[in-house]
Amino acid sequence: MPESLEFDFDNTERQPLHAFTERAYLDYSMYVILDRALPHVGDGLKPVQRRIIYAMSELALAAGAKFKKSARTVGDVIGKFHPHGDMACYEAMVLMAQPFSYRYPIVDGQGNWGSADEPKSFAAMRYTEARLTRYAEVLLKELGQGTVDWVPNFDGTLEEPRLLPARLPNVLLNGGTGIAVGMATDIPPHNLREVAAACIRLLDDPGATVAALCEHVLGPDYPTSGELITPPDELLKLYETGMGSVRMRAVYEVEDGNIVVTALPYQASGNRIQEQIAFQMQAKKLPMIEDLRDESDHETPVRLVLVPRSNRVEVEPLMAHLFATTDLERSYRVNLNMIGVNGRPQVKNLKMLLVEWLGYRTETVRRRLAHRLAEVERRLHVLAGLLIAFLNIDEVIHIIRHEDPPKPVLIARFGLSDVQAEAILDLKLRHLARLEEMKIRGEQADLLEEKRALELPLGSPKALNALIRKEIQEDAERHGDARRSPIVRRAEAQALAAAELVQSEPITVILSKKGWVRAAKGHDIDPTELAFRSGDEFRAAACGRSQQPAVFLDSTGRCYSVPAHVLPSARGLGEPLSGWVTPPDGASFEGVMLGPPESLWLIASDAGYGFVARLSDLYAKNKAGKVVLSVPSGARVLLPVLVTDPGADLCAVASARGRLLVFPVSELPLLQKGKGLKLIQISSAKLAAREELVAGVCSVPEGGSLVVVAGQRHLTLTTRDLAAYTGVRGTRGQTLPRGFQNVSGVGKKNGRA
């Protein structure tokens, strides 16, 4: 039976549970923030990345070395510096090797390192091989030159660099993402030459603003060649605050009628985009696309081919819809959060970031120069002792042969230091030749010149800045390249409305006098030759596209909108328009308008009043329509007329009593609704008695002709002829020739009177 155990709690620390858990959570949070998730402004690396690069340099895996198995590198990293999971370490290594993930890859991989479509499809570490790229020199070149602090590894058996002596602001060049506790970072990659130019601008002008620096740093530069479509003012705000977002869009071109996508946004998967487009095609939401092919290969990594159903499909609206509904356009969050030189995380704007990195770089260069200067001075000190020995070679040999130990005697005899005496004793016999004195003096001269060159920047901030500037320029020339992500201005992508998701083709909408409507394909049809129901005949027609809404004008001045693609085919006799809209009792349909939303139409009544309206302002949202034209009592609505060019077209107004007035369309107001202005003067009494009224209005384009109809007679007036009828708007106009005292209508040349 074991004896009872007794516990002594007198020396045990006691604290409340909430205090312990709060402290433990804060410690964990700071560990994740500082040692795992956020990059450092100095070298732009997270600890695992820094340890991978350092371990590869220790394995002598420079750019010119032979490839070595990735498993060897990962083993060294987790065994010596980073005691975490091997797959997590390997994935960090893979990321630095993928040219579609890193703007300037640091690891040069051989084997299957994944693809842009499937970045996680890389082979196991036992199959792949790796070495460092030449760009890695930017991070490692000055490592052994006293530039950084060294700290013990996790078990205290080795030392590792706390930071790497980056010669360029890698934190901007390759960017980085990470999620810590309570904060995250999303730093996009940038172009090396642009960032280098901004650093040089700050060295030359420390007071430069963020806007001035943005003259050099135009925006993020991703590894892929997608277009950066974020407006410049938003990019400037992003760099001023350190937070925001950017948008990238795929690049496409038209080849032989097909739409070929040649570049995708950053981290966009071609397979995923094909699935998104195919899903819409299967759901019959993209009837304008007939086929989708992936013609990508090794030489052309991105080539997605969209085959339109016909050559009448409008490419730009279609692509705008795909940009809005698929990954052909993506948005990326930007959060310039990083660990500063002071060891604290902070969201920095562009100037803060570059100023802090330049401070880090200045200190790195100063330490490098001081380290080299100390080496030069030590060597000069040794050479001075060796020169004394060569000048007194016989006596030195005698002391070495007869004195035991010889070092104190040499120090006392020639006034040498311990280091100098040790160097003399370490000399080999072969170096006692007469020529060695000349070599020593030559080396002394070279080192003295190097010493003066080192002391100059160490003693002059201006010279130090000049040296840093020169080195940044050299590295930019050696490692820089042209921008890959062009910055362009593009309209915001808009998904097509349900009515627009139909095949876009030219159509002609025909309206009969009794209000029957139909649509014929093409614009070359003559609607007057179509068959109509008994007692019915042609009233009006308008040309446009099937994706556009047709606008109908009734005798009360109300407008109604009906999607053109839902109208019945002209192969039949049509259907009553009242099936789609509900006009007031007794109203009849007088005209139809169709075309782009921005097209202009002249709307008037036979009372002699009218105005110009934009077609989009005439769209009605409900079946009851909306009032557009105020029609005086007893007056009727005239056929609406398309205005080709409001700055050059002429408005021709003909009264039924044979008077014609011509004036510029620009004299008419652009209204959304109303009565309009007086077009031609008509007697109120005769108008009320319907004895005198406006027979028709027409917009005559520059160089066009006007046809005046009076019964079976037709009079064609050219632009030169119309000059005789030009007058002031609102006057009576000029009398037409004999035989045209009873005008029934006017129209354009080859148009319906």
Image (cartoon, rainbow, N blue to C red):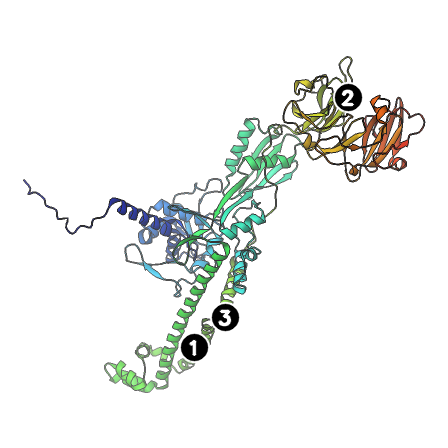
SS for tag 2?
strand
Q: Residues within 10 Å of mark 1 (few under 14, many from 20)?
A: some
Q: Identify the residue at horizontal 52%, vertical 42% (top origin).
A: 331
In the figure, is residue 142 to the left or right of 416?
Answer: right
Image quarter of residue 214: bottom right
Instruction: Give the residue type that dot 3 points to.
Output: Ala
Quick check: can you spot residue 4? yes
Residue furthest out toward the right: 738
Structural distance between the alpha carbons of marks 3 and 1: 25 Å
Quick check: can you spot residue 294? no
Q: Which disc is residue 443 wearing?
A: 1
In the figure, is residue 604 to the left or right of 87?
Answer: right
In the figure, is residue 79 to the left or right of 525?
Answer: left
Q: Identify the residue at horizontal 10%, vertical 45% (top origin).
A: 6
Instruction: Give the residue type that dot 2 points to.
Output: Arg
Image quarter of residue 528: top right
**Residue linked to disc 2:** 539
